[in-house]
Amino acid sequence: MRVTGQEVIAYVAEFYDLSVGDLKGTSRARRLARPRQIACYVMRCVCPHLSFPAIGRLLGGRDHTTVLHAVSKVSELMADAHGFESDVADILAHFYRPTSADLYLRARIIDAERHLEALKAQAAGSPALFEAAA
């Protein structure tokens, strides 16, 4: 299932106890601008189908260079500011929850890996298995 930009905006607004209108608005107050920048960053991560101009349109008609700056700024802050990275990680985690199909496939992979290890252990005890195959 593809994540939409509107879903990201709604979740970021909820996460920071803001309205969607606040994120799409024109205010440059830090309490609004920072979550708006985070929304840009998250959309670039979880909505690869959205271009910079498309993200800008979703966030109140902002220019693509504003979105580019926001993504760059959030990346920079994640490396420098303590606590900032955990907020972004929590928001990203909301959109990266595995589906039941993902969990089923992961379980099958684990089973196959265990089976392979058992075969390797069995073969290590009996080198004749490899000689016969050669």
Image: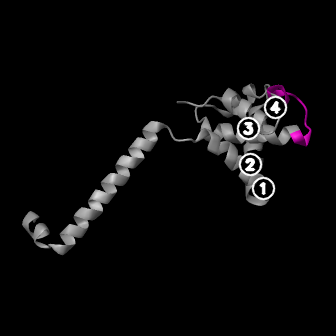
**According to the image, label 1 marks what residue?**
83
Helix, strand or loop for disc 1: loop
Neighbours of disc 4 within 10 Å: few (<14), some (14-19), many (20+): many
Q: Which residue is mark 2?
A: 87
Q: Which residue is mark 3?
A: 39
- Stretch in magenta: 20-31
Q: Secondary structure at mark 4?
A: helix
Q: Nearer the viewer, mark 2 or mark 4?
A: 2
Q: Is residue 22 within the magenta segment?
A: yes
Write down the quadrant of residue 123 in the picture: bottom left
Name the residue at 58% across, 31% down: 49
Q: CA distance from mark 4 to mark 1?
A: 21 Å
Q: CA distance from mark 2 to mark 4?
A: 17 Å
In this rendering, position of residue 130 left or right of residue 82: left
At 14% from the left and 73% from the top, the residue drawn is: 127
Cα distance in 3D space between marks 1 and 2: 7 Å
Q: Relative to residue 105, is residue 64 depicted above or below?
A: above
For disc 4, the marked residue is: 23
Q: Earlier in the sequence, mark 4 or mark 1?
A: 4
Judged left or right of residue 121, residue 90 is: right
Tell me, for residue 6, which label it has, or none. Answer: none
